[in-house]
Image: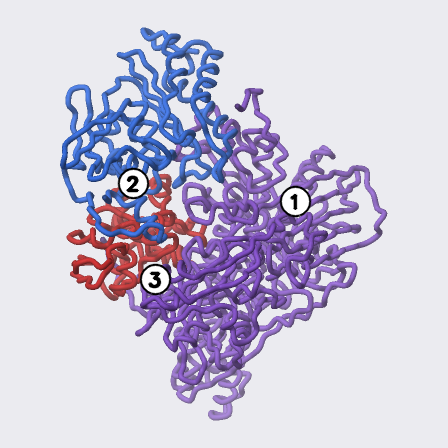
Chain colours: A purple, B blue, C red
Amino acid sequence: MSVVTTPQRIDRTGRVGENAPRPDGIPKVTGDFAFSGDFRHAGMLWGGTLRSPHPSARVLSVDVSRALAMTGVHAALTWEDVPGSLHYGLEHPDQPVLADGVVRYQGEPVAVVAADHPDTVRRALDAIVVDYRELQPLIDPELAEEAPPIHPDGNLIRRIQLRHGPQEAVGDVAVEGTYEVGMQDQAPLGTESGLAVPDDRGGVDLYVSTQDLHADRDQVAACLGLEPEAVRLTLAGVGGAFGAREDISLHVHLCLLALRTGRPVKMSYSRTESFHGHVHRHPARMWYRHHARADGTLVRVEARLLFDGGAYASTSSAVLANATCFAVGPYRVDSAQIEGVAVRTNNPPCGAMRGFGCVQVCFAHEAQMDRLADALGMDPVELRLANALEPGDRIITGQRITGTAPVAEVIRSCADHPSAAARSDNPMSRPGGAGRTADVEHVVRGEALAVGFKNLMFSEGFDDYSTAACRLADGVATITSACAEVGQGFVTLAHQIAHEVLGVDEVVLAPVSTATIASAGSTSASRQTWMSGGAVQAACEAVRARLLDRVAAAHGVPVDDLVLVDGRVAALSGAFEMDLAEATAQPVEAEEVYRHAPTVALDDDGQGDAHVSFAFSAHRAIVDVDVDLGLVKVVELTTSQDVGRVLNPLQVIGQLEGGAAQGIGLAVLEELQVAEGRILNPSFTDYLLPTALDMPPVEIAALIEQPEPGAPFGAKGVGEPPTISSTAAVAAAVRRATGLDLPRVPIRPADIAFRGGTGQRPTGEDPS
Amino acid sequence: MLAGGTDLMVEVNHGRRHLVDVVTLDQIPELSHWERNGDVFRLGSGLTYTALAGPLLADFLPGLAQAARTVGSPQIRNSGTLGGNLATASPAGDTIPVLAALDAVVELRSADGHREVPVTDFITGVKHNDLRPGELIEAIRVPVADGPQEFLKVGTRNAMVISVVSLAMVVDLSAHQVRVGLGAVSPVPERATEAEAFINGLIDWDGQVLPEAATVDRFADLVVTAASPIDDHRGSAAYRRHALGVLARRALIRCFGEENR
Amino acid sequence: MTVDPYVLHINGADHPVVDGRIDESLLWVLRERLELPGSKNACEEGECGSCTVRLDDEIVCSCLVLAASAAGRRITTIEGLAAEGELADVQQAFIDAGAVQCGFCTPGLLVAIDRLLDDHPDPEELTVQEAISGNLCRCTGYGRILAAVQLAAAARRGSETQAVVR
């Protein structure tokens, strides 16, 4: 084994635009990086959660006395032990901390315990007696609005009636389709876990993996009945997120147990519990009708979108707004009527997942564009180019695109990129992989392109901001931000930005905690590069200005002549130079709040300047399909993306490849199967994530760099688009290969083998 | 009794099973031993899937090697054993259809003595077997077959996936037999005996030539009739039947070559 | 049910386990009793590879190894891949190739790839894909990981040619 000696402290970073290494890279490869499940504490207890086996039931009683009587059990709590608000939620506090009389989904927490060992926890949970009276679950979202309410807030979470332009427009051709998307899970590899440590003043410290410390803190404090300052959240290492950590999960439970027992308490969900313990991507049913002129010009789009929110609201309202606003894709259309509906059912709760509402509609609008191209006899790429949005165009909310919109560039570069896909002679590379089911003659190939469209950052008038502080002392910059690093690489960008602005090599990121700084907002909506990147930039620039003012005053140099470069303060004239460490022996500090341009709420017709900025992507998929068995191998994925400006090429590639893998997963593998409100496959044995043998090479045709006005360094967030158009492209390529409609993802083997999932046999053989 | 642990430890980790006394078998070299005695291979029950897929055994037992290579992941194949696959007795156990097609016999050992049971009798139901208290799977005896062998497994993912349906085919040229084992389509290991009898009588064994295509289809239909699959979250019974027929057709053509049709 | 004290030989050192319970997995004992939390727990059923360790010469899922049964065997975890303050070639390659995002799958992958390169100093892509098909990564889509394997292989071969990161 060859060994490289490397100092434990990263002292090299890079400028903005370079491949700076991750500052957390070394601890992550040595195993030293502390994830939320890795924390330990002297005298620590283990926590566990009792969950409802029923999707809908009255809880007549919960008896914890037998559990409490067990040796080693220190607490067993129910809703009656919740001192503050009994409910929490990101948009509406509608979700019980612990079930208070009713359970509305399978897996809903009913009681929590703390004990000396996980095995004791397990036995204590078994000893809790719950008297349920089962109710008929509401499982069909189509029936939700008419059904008796399953929650005091009713079964309608939100309806948006978007009307844009003249409503009577018709074209020469109309195509219609109904599409369905199954329930995808974020499946971050790190399950929910954390450690709560009580203090001696009635407060608590919580070390937890999350996407938004401050939003968590506020919800936790409200449920504990404590002032926010008494609840301090510190970011523990996050094993992926993808939306699964936008809502709180075990946070309040851990704090309740710690405060009750006076002992530190650790909890770590099993994989099965994790599948039950966080929200999922909304399953959707979508009806569309596209009208176009004979030359391909889109005239009008009608759609009805039904999103199943499951038992609690979570972020359904915002997900639905995205789905509705971006329902037609990145195309110019002067007339639209989109009805978006999100409802409550007794299915597992749904909320944020990478792509946030745009994944579902992209699958549908891109299928429609292909269908329209077929109806018109047009090339599907040309049809898309003919309707591609341009800067200055209005989207269907009436909002004019004032920033960049290189839609045509994204499409053309992706479509024109040469393919490197060859036919492999290794059976492992064919559909069916290691199972070696297909021979060459059983495989057909298909190729197709899809285009994705999404907003960046929070919309609809949300006061979206990020706070960051910079302290420059002895030539070392310390950055404080509550931005949750979940793997995306914000920590690298923070280093690069500080290096760029201050000319320092040594950058330290302070621990991420609610105790030291105000909110950075959520690590979601592709927003942190822009928002917290902007806040870090602003704080560093403020420090630079203060420092230069001070040096100018102290040394009688004109401030406009001074620059910070390579660890020195220098005059451009060459008349003055000073080591930065010396110049900052007396520290310089600044804290700044960054806000993006304000947005407004949608009006009654779904119109308004509700969004800040937009990003676009295209994927071209090449797939091999074993039609008889219905098995698919994605052979190659080519992508182009509108990125504004590349701040770190390797990290951008990582986002594009990783996002595409999740898109492929939704296209052909990943679905939480729910029957009668129960999840049938809550394990990694049966919820199938793509393996290395399922992922094709991702060819990056182009990163379109058109700096976005108003964005720090001109950069757009890059995390979500790769997940949006990849699913649609793979599904379309399977359609091309098979000639089938395939209106649903994930595409299951039987959908292909039985020619469209009707259960019909392909060759007229008797299925019995 | 713990061999590779890849099934039992899952139960333990999830709190579904509590261990009291454990006998671990993974460090008993005799159990990981294999030998050839004339026309019979004797495979120690502790042979891992990695060992079964290795070149030494794969040359003689290619169907078993291919099945072993599709089990779980490299990590699982390094731990999981042939004996463990039988002890767990899952309908989706990947080696089981191959062992059935090979006419394998399970050698059982206890303090009281030794007995032998054909693999198709050893597994008595879903996750049930004929193992008696105090008994251990010592070895699996497999007669050598001198023709081609195939194992095909349908899983939705390209690797690390539990079988939705699988099929093993062993051709014994000397005995003029095609033998077919079915996986994940029945509670106990099934052989497609009717299909076997049908095709054995039609093959031109001297030229190793297949009959015409219609006969291949009839063979596939008969294989399907031997299955009694269920609907579950991994696939429907209808899909399993359909896919089984496809696998039967492909396996037969792989073993005898399409050009002979 | 407690088990008699036993000793695990991990990363070249003996680690006594006292007061252990019979049904504890090697992963649990590493993480919770021996303060070696580098091996990760993501499924506890051998379907993710996050807990991969080397047991004697082969990689296994430590979640499926009964801890007490590993007494007397050589165990190598992520913490033992390189000496303190040093990085193994695979570790350096992961950093250089951008193969690390959230990092949760990283330790298991590194142990698996380190073992792969013992047998395959110049592995083909399909060989690598099969070798790591038991290690799920949710962040990267595996592209940078495959690139890192080639970088590490080149480093280990001492090759003059710079492996190109695709």
Q: Is residue A585 left or right of C152 when viewed as pictured?
A: right
Asked if disc 1 and disc 3 are in contact, CB closer than 8 Å, the reply is: no
**Could you give the CA–CA distance between mark 3 and mark 2, rounded to whole angstroms?**
29 Å
- Work out whether A595 lies above or below A319: below
Q: Position of residue C72 (x, y in %)?
A: 15, 52
Picture coordinates of residue B145 (x, y %)? 26, 19
Instruction: Please name which of the two marks, 3 or 2, marks the residue nearer to the observer.
Output: 3
Q: Please identify, in this view, whether the residue under mark 1 or under mark 2 is nearer the observer.
A: 2
Q: Would you name the residue on which mark 1 appears? A: A364
Q: What residue sits right under mark 2 in the picture? A: B77
Residue nearest the observer in this picture, C140 or B25: B25
Residue toward you, A439 or A356: A356
Task: Answer left or right for A682 relative to B128.
Answer: right
Residue at mark 3: A118
- Picture layout, residue B213 above or below residue A605: above
CA gap, disc 1 and disc 3: 45 Å
Nearer to me, C112 or A704: C112
Asked which quadrant contains residue A9, the reply is bottom left
Of the residues shown, which amino acid type is indicated by label 2? Arg
* Residue drawn at (41%, 51%) of the image: C137
In terms of image quadrants, where is residue C131?
Answer: top left
Discs 1 and 2 lie in a common subunit: no
